[in-house]
């Protein structure tokens, strides 16, 4: 303990609190004989989660590029982090009117194509935890409450894709499809998004087939089998 305090320039009470927290979460452990601390096994678990996400990004990249070329709209790859979707990769449309999102952008999951595509295929308990009890309404089309979102997700799961019909941003439509890993768990989603003036019902219908094929191919490369 004294060595830790000296190296980190912390007082004993602060260091003690930090160490107890790390031990509680399995990030460090104490040798019963020497009383010295070492890294815990849960760090390996956390590291594997990060690697899995990076694998998704690497595997999906060429497929995202193909989808972007076929649709000429912006394509996103996203994961769920708590109640939010985080974009971890994107390919931008060549159109003059396009989205200027960034990798790392976050949005509430309940009103995005990627978010709804993932939420719909999560276990019920996780799904409920990932939807806030009180929803912010970003546009007049945003779903009104948690109950409505849960009912909507049943339809998303049945059809295998999600549509954000100007729910997150006025004038923007988005289609999302889930990506599964080797264990059958939904780990990410891919979406195609563009201005509603271009994303007509006919174009969305065309995009759905392209998007679902792409999501299925990424899932297959992650080891998923139906």
Image (tube, rainbow, N blue to C red):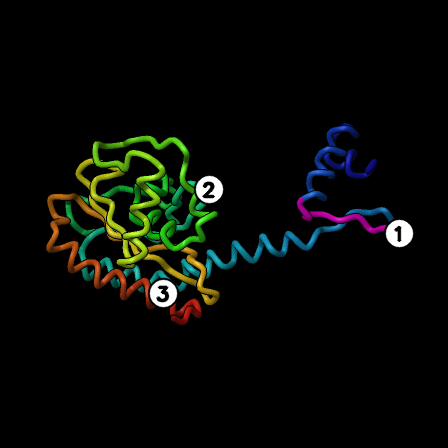
Dot 1 or dot 3: first in sequence order is 1
Where disc 3 sits, the SS reads helix
Where disc 2 sits, the SS reads helix
Please give the residue where the numbered disc 1 appears in the rendered image.
Answer: 33
The quarter of the picture where the C terminus appears is bottom left
> What crowding class fits label 3: few (fewer than 14 Cα within 10 Å), some (14-19), or many (20 or more)?
many
Report if the CB atoms under discs 3 and 2 are less than 8 Å apart.
no
Give me the residue at 23% from left, 57% from top: 68
| Percent coordinates x, y for residue 60 in the rendering | 36, 62
Residue 102 magenta-highlighted: no
Q: Tell which tag, 3 or 2, sits nearer the viewer.
A: 2
Determine which quarter of the picture holds residue 204: bottom left
Determine which quarter of the picture holds residue 65: bottom left
When the figure is inspected, residue 78 is found, relative to residue 206, above or below; the finding is above
- The foreground one among 141 and 77 is 141
Residue 29 magenta-highlighted: yes
The quarter of the picture where the N terminus appears is top right
Q: Tell which tag, 1 or 2, sits nearer the viewer.
A: 2
Give me the residue at 63% from left, 56% from top: 44
User: Left or right: where does residue 30 sit relative to residue 184?
Assistant: right
When the figure is inspected, residue 97 is found, relative to residue 62, above or below; the finding is above
- Magenta region: which residues? 25-33
User: Left or right: where does residue 158 sit relative to residue 130?
Assistant: left
Please give the residue where the numbered disc 3 appears in the rendered image.
Answer: 218
The Cα–Cα distance between marks 1 and 3, rounded to whole angstroms, is: 48 Å
When the figure is inspected, residue 89 is found, relative to residue 99, above or below; the finding is below
């Amino acid at each position: 303990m004294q060595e830790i305090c000296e190296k980190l320039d912390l007082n004993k009470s602060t260091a003690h609190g930090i160490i107890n927290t790390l031990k509680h979460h399995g990030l460090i452990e104490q040798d019963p004989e020497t009383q010295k601390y070492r890294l815990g096994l849960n760090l390996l678990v956390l590291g594997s989660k990060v690697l899995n996400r990076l694998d998704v990004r690497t595997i999906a990249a060429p497929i995202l590029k193909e989808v972007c070329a076929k649709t000429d709209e912006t394509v996103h790859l996203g994961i769920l982090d708590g109640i939010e979707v985080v974009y971890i990769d994107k390919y931008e449309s060549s159109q003059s009117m396009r989205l200027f999102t960034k990798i790392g952008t976050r949005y509430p999951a309940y009103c995005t194509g990627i978010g709804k595509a993932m939420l719909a295929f999560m276990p019920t308990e996780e799904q409920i935890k990932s939807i806030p009890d009180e929803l912010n309404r970003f546009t007049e089309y945003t779903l009104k409450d948690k109950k409505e979102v849960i009912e909507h997700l049943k339809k998303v799961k049945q059809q295998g894709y999600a549509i954000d019909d100007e729910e997150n941003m006025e004038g923007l439509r988005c289609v999302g499809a889930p990506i599964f890993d080797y264990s059958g768990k939904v780990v990410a989603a891919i979406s195609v998004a563009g201005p509603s003036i271009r994303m007509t019902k006919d174009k969305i219908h065309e995009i759905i087939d392209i998007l679902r094929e792409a999501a299925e191919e990424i899932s297959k490369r992650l080891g998923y089998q139906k």
